[in-house]
Image (cartoon, rainbow, N blue to C red):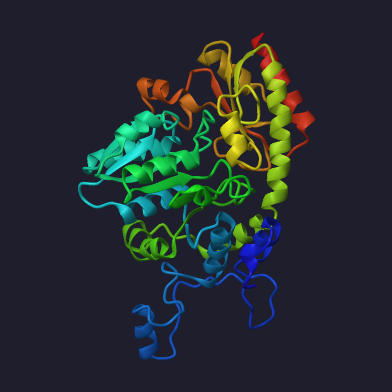
Amino acid sequence: MEDIRNKGFATQQIHAGAKKDPYGALTMPIYMTSTFAFDSVQQGSARFALKEEGYVYTRAGNPTLSQVEEKMAVLEGGEAAVGTASGMGAISSAIWTLLEAGDEIVASNTLYGCTFALFSSDMPRIGFKVHFVDFTDLDALSAAINEKTKIVYFETPCNPTLKVIDIEAVCKLSHEKNKNACVMVDNTFASPYLQQPLKLGADVVVHSATKYINGHGDEICGFIVGSKDFIMAVHGSGLKEMTGAVMDPHCAFMINRGLGTLDLRMEKHCANAMEVAKFLHDHPAVEKVYYPGLEDFEGYEIAKKQMRLPGAMLSIDLRGGRDAVGEAINKLKLCRIAVSLGDAETLVEHPATMTHATHSAQDLKDSGITEGLVRISVGREDAADIIDDLKQALDSLL
């Protein structure tokens, strides 16, 4: 469908990337093959030299992957996309494609635990300087960007405090300070249904597609979306040679299936999250609710400007010490104690001891993560049942 980019989101999530199957299959088959045969040596040589379209080896491309990659590019408003074996595979493959000796990174001081560890420990260990900044402070961000800055990296909403960063403002400032800087946004918490950073000035979007893109908690995968030239570079360098973090064809098939209901799932997730946030806002055991849909939340206005809906992730600060908070979480019956997010089930975790356990005490403080912070991925159960379960657990703190 040549004009698919002019269609609505629901049409795009179902039809983008579709190819005519020689046998008439409505659903793209799983091309479960490691390699592809050529009709001749000349054809093989032409494909290796990128002078002829076609497939060579699944690490460099596969028809099942191609369909879902094209679909993700359309949904994010990018020229092209590449699937990876995990969200961290997406982040690593993207940054390794960009970096050269002497380059520097400016990163948000509130990030997913493994991303923070990559930037705070691994990158400096091999010689790359990383500056951590509060991206809601544009003056501080401006001061951190210099002529050596290659990557400006952030999430919004941030994990796990739901801090909302003004994408358009950060992109404008970053490109003014250094026209060669690549602004990279992790859009995992929102999904392209709620937010499209590329349309707000970002250069690259990364996803842990394990979460809302998949939506069923049964695959590990990621995506990188950006310009055609950048994605070709990722295919040829960061992914193919440096990380090898390739999405497998069965996973691509499952992601394609999950994307067909992304809008419906996100609408339900967000409606539930709003009900849960309102309940938590009034519960006496809760000191603070971090949710972009609440009018008294600091990032409410920015979220309203750049997001279709405020999302289904929220966090709360609970009264009592770490042990008391842990005991309250242990009383949950319907909600599951687990990391990850975007599943049908409501998932609850304690960032300080789980997703952000590698943070030092100072790192936790700088990121705004307290001992009483609890992160909730609101699922697709009946909202009343989620609230009942949270209430009986939180009541134990009173």
What residue occupies the far front of the structure in this picture?
176
Q: Is residue 333 visible?
A: no
Query: Looking at the rendering, in which quadrant would you find the C terminus?
Result: top right
| Residue 346 in the image, given as x and y percentages of width and height | 66, 35
**Above or below, comparing residue 290 to residue 169 in the picture:** above
Residue at 42% across, 62% down = 231
| Residue 248 in the image, given as x and y percentages of width and height | 50, 62
**Above or below, comparing residue 86 to residue 152 in the picture:** below
Which picture quadrant has residue 14?
A: bottom right
Foreground: 238 or 4? 4
Q: How many numbered marks does the figure carry?
A: 0
Query: Looking at the rendering, in which quadrant would you find the N terminus?
Result: bottom right
Residue at 62% across, 18% down = 328
Judge left or right: residue 321 versus residue 272.
Answer: left
| Residue 216 in the image, given as x and y percentages of width and height | 64, 48
What residue occupies the far top of the structure in this picture?
398
| Residue 210 in the image, given as x and y percentages of width and height | 55, 48
Which picture quadrant has residue 366?
A: top left
Q: Is residue 344 visible?
A: yes
Which picture quadrant has residue 173?
A: top left
Judge left or right: residue 259 versus residue 122.
Answer: right
Foreground: 100 or 298? 298
Residue at 21% across, 42% down = 127
